[in-house]
Image (tube, rainbow, N blue to C red):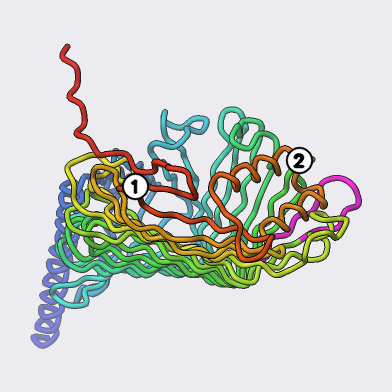
Amino acid sequence: MKRAYLAIGVVATIIVAWSVAWWLGRETMRTVLTQETTALAAAGIDLDYEIAWTDGYPFAHRLLLRDVTLAQDATGSLTLPSVMISRGFPGGGDVTISLPQSALLSVAGAAGSEGSAEGAAEYSLALDGGEITLSELTPEEGIVAGALAGVTVTLPPDGDGAAEGELALSGLTLRLIRPTGTAFGMADRDWRLILDAESAAIRAAAGPGTAAVGQAVSRWSAAIERVGVTARWQGTDPMLGGLTASLRSGAIAVQVAGAPPLGDAALSMGTFAGTYSVSNGLGTVRATLDETTLTHRPATGQAAPRSLAIDRVDIAQSDPVSPITSQANLEVRLSAGEIVPDDAAWNWLDAAGRLPRETGQIHFTMNARAVPSNLPDPYLPLGGRIASLAFDIDMRGLGAAAAGTVQLQIAADGSTRGGGRIVLDGSMGLIRDLIAAEVMDIPTAQFVLDLAARYARPGALPEDLVVDIRSENGQLVIGDEEVTLFQPLLPAPNPPDE
C-alpha cells in the first residue's frame, strides 16, 4: 500500500511540476509576443491583436490571436481574422504560425476601391494551407520559413467598376534569415530572403474608368512558370548599399484582349532573369529575356495574326538613388538580337514587297561618369553632375545600318571636349524604300532630309550618310551646326523675400 501511495505521490509531483513548467512556458510565449510587438513598433510597424485563449496542454503551447493587424502608415496594413501560434512542449523548438483562409491587404497611396479608406486600395487574400515556421539557426541568426499551397490576391472593382484583378500563386515557399533579437527594418547585419513559387497567374480587367488606356484594353492575363525571388540586405541603409535582389522565371505567356480597332495581343517568353542591386548610392537593374515573341491578332477583317520574334533581349540601367558623394559610373544598355517579323507582319508593314526583309538587331550602350557637385544638374536631380558621357550604337535592318561611337568630357560650365562619328549606311535608300512602301509620307521624308542636310554629310557611297560630332572651343558641333546639350551649372537662386 505504501508503495502505491509513493507511486501516486511521484506521479502527482510530476504532473504538478509538468503543469507548472507548461504554465511558465505559456507565459514565456506571451512575453516573447509582447517583445516582438515592441520591437516592431520601434521600426514603425504597429501590431495589434486580441489574445482569445491559450491551449495545448500537456504537450504543446497554442496561442490563438484574433483580429490581428500589421500596419505602417507609409505602406498600408494587413488584417487577419485569426492566427494560431504553437510550439512543442517540452523542449520548445520551432514556433509554428498557422494562417487563416482569408486576409485583407490595404495598400496606402493607391487609388481607393469602394468601401476602402481614402487613398488606399484594398486587396482580399485567399490562403490555402498557410503555415510559417520560426527557427533558430545559431545564437546570432534566426530563420522564418513559410509555405502556402496557394494564395490568391483579388482587387475588387472600384466605385465606377473600373478595374478588378487577381493574382494567384501556387506551391509558394519562403525563407527569411535575419539576425535574432532584431525587428524588421532595424537590423544592421545580414538579412536574406528566398521566395519560390511553382507557378503564378495574373488576371486583370479594365473598365470605363481606365482613362490611361481609354477603351483600348478590356482585359489581360498572364501565366508564369517557376517564379523565384532572392534578396539580401547587409547594412543599415538600403539606399547606401548592401541591397541585392533577383527575380527569375520560366516560361511567361501574356494575353491582352483589346476592343476594336486594337485587337488582341499575346506575348510569350522562354525565360526571364533580372537583378537589382544598390552599392554606394547607385541602383542597378539588369534583365535578360530569352525567346520573346509578340503576336497581334486584328480585331476586324480576315487578316492573319502577325508576330515579331526576338531571340534575346538584354537590358541594364544604373541610376543614383542618393546624392553622389564619390565618383560613380552610370550605365544604360539595350541589346536585342535577331529581330524577325513573320510573313504576316511583313505583309502588313509592306504589302508591295518594297522593303528588304532582313533580320534586325539593336545594340545601344551609354556610359556616364558622375562626380560630386553642389550645383544642381538637371540630369542628376539627387545631386552630383555628369562629367563625361560615352555611347556606342549598332542598329541594323531593312537594308540599312547605323553604327558609331561618341565620347565627351563635360565641364561644370557646360563646355565639352571630345567627339565621335556615326555612320548611316544605306540611309538614303531606306528613306526611298519607306516612301515606296507607303510607310513614310512625303512631308515626313522631307523633314528627315532637312535634318540630314543640317547635321550629316555624304558617306563613302551615294546612299550613305555620316554624322560628325566634335568640340570647338568648348562648343559642341554636330555636322556644321552648333548645339547646346549641356547648360552651365549655376547655384540655385535664393527664394524671393516675402
Please, what is the three-letter code of the amino acid marked with disc 2? Ile
- The quarter holding residue 54 reads bottom left
Residue in view at x 35 percent, y 61 percent = 284
Residue in view at x 44 percent, y 45 percent = 104
- The magenta-colored residue range is 293-306
> 191 or 338: which is nearer to us?
338
In the rendered image, residue 299 lying in the magenta stretch gets the answer yes
- The quarter holding residue 167 reads bottom right
Rendered location of residue 465, percent (x, y)? 60, 58
Question: In the rendered image, which quarter contains the N terminus?
Answer: bottom left
Residue in view at x 20 percent, y 40 percent = 375
Is residue 132 shown above or below 240?
below
Rendered location of residue 172, percent (x, y)? 47, 67
Please, what is the three-letter code of the amino acid marked with disc 1? Arg
In the rendered image, residue 274 lying in the magenta stretch gets the answer no
Residue lying furthest bottom? 3
Is residue 16 shown above or below 430?
below
Rendered location of residue 255, percent (x, y)? 68, 56
Question: Which label's residue is closer to the chain start, 2 or 1?
Answer: 1
Q: Which residue is mark 1?
A: 66
> 306 or 419: which is nearer to us?
419
Number of numbered callouts drawn: 2
Report helix, strand or loop for mark 1.
strand
Q: Which residue is mark 2?
A: 442
Q: Nearer the viewer, mark 2 or mark 1?
A: 2
> 368 or 279: which is nearer to us?
368
**301 horizontally vs 106: left or right:** right
